[in-house]
Structure formats: C-alpha cells, structure tokens
Amino acid sequence: MKIVEIKAKMILLGREGNDSSITLFEKSVLGEIAEPLVKKVVDLFADKKYKDAAKLSKDFLDGDELKEEIEGFLEVNELSGIDHFGTECNYHPDFDYNQLSCYIEEDGSGFHIDYDLTTDGELNDLTLQMDIVFTKKNTAEIQKIECNII
C-alpha cells in the first residue's frame, strides 16, 4: 500500500492532523510500514553493526556514539546483547501491550516508532525510538534513530 493511499484513508477517517488519536486500523497500517524498518535497525543492533544502523537515518547519527550508548547500557546491566527482531518477548502484562507502537504526527507528515528491545526474550528497559517521514516518492524514510531508557 502506498503512503498516499494511507494518508487518504486517514483523512477519510477524520484524522487530518487535528486529532492525535489513532484508530486500530491506522495503527495496523503504520505497523505494516514500521515493521520492516524496525527489523532492519534491530537486527543491525543485534549483530553489533551500529555504524550501519546509523547510516539508515537521514539525520546524521554517529555510529560510535550509538555503539557506546548501547554497549554501555548492556555492560552496566550485565546483559549479553540485543535480541534480533521477532524474538518472542516474554512480557505478558494484564493490560493491552504492544512491543511496537506507532504514533502519527499531528500534521500527517510521518510517524514516531517506539520498539521495546529485549535480551533473551526479556525486556531490558532500552527502547528504540525512530521518527519516520513520508516522502514525495510515496515512501517512508527514517529521519532519526535513538535509544533511550524508558
């Protein structure tokens, strides 16, 4: 599905940017776009290819700085590494939880992604955060990549 079609459906659903809430339909569509982008970055993290992950971002990101942040977090917390995308997450709370969450920008220009990273299937408090922009070529590009403790 092209980005233009997604934007059109969001406008038809009354989400032209004046309402930041997202319907389940819109979340599933954003998830379809987000998943391969997140997979690429998370798998590079798991393989310790931080410079390659940094190159995926339009806003220059220092691969060495990203490596220091992630490796430092893992060392301090005595964790072996970051799991590859698709590793089953053993976190099953009594409330609605999604390891991958997407939030549309109010102006419809793109969306934000939060992906809870895991180690050996357990949440490790490190969250991959990405900003995605829609382009004039009907594609979605990674604008920014960062990891934060959440």
Image: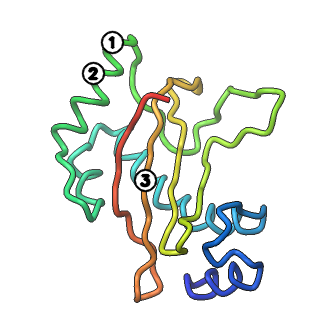
Residue occupying the point 40% across, 34% down: 148
Which residue is identified by label 1?
76
- Residue 28 screen position, x and y as percent: 71, 63
Element class at badge 3:
strand
Q: Nearer the viewer, mark 2 or mark 3?
A: 3
Quarter of the picture holding the N terminus: bottom right
Which residue is identified by label 2?
72
Residue occupying the point 41% across, 46% down: 43
Which residue is identified by label 3?
130
> How far is disc 2 from disc 3 in space, using C-alphas?
20 Å
- Residue 136 screen position, x and y as percent: 41, 88
Residue occupying the point 71% across, 68% down: 26
Q: Please determine whether, in this image, residue 114 is positioned above or below residue 29.
A: above
Q: Please determine whether, in this image, residue 88 is positioned above or below residue 107.
A: above
Labels 2 and 1 touching (C-beta < 8 A): yes
The kind of residue on which mark 1 rests is Val
Element class at badge 1:
helix
Q: Nearer the viewer, residue 59 or 108?
A: 108
Image quadrant in which you'd find residue 106: bottom right
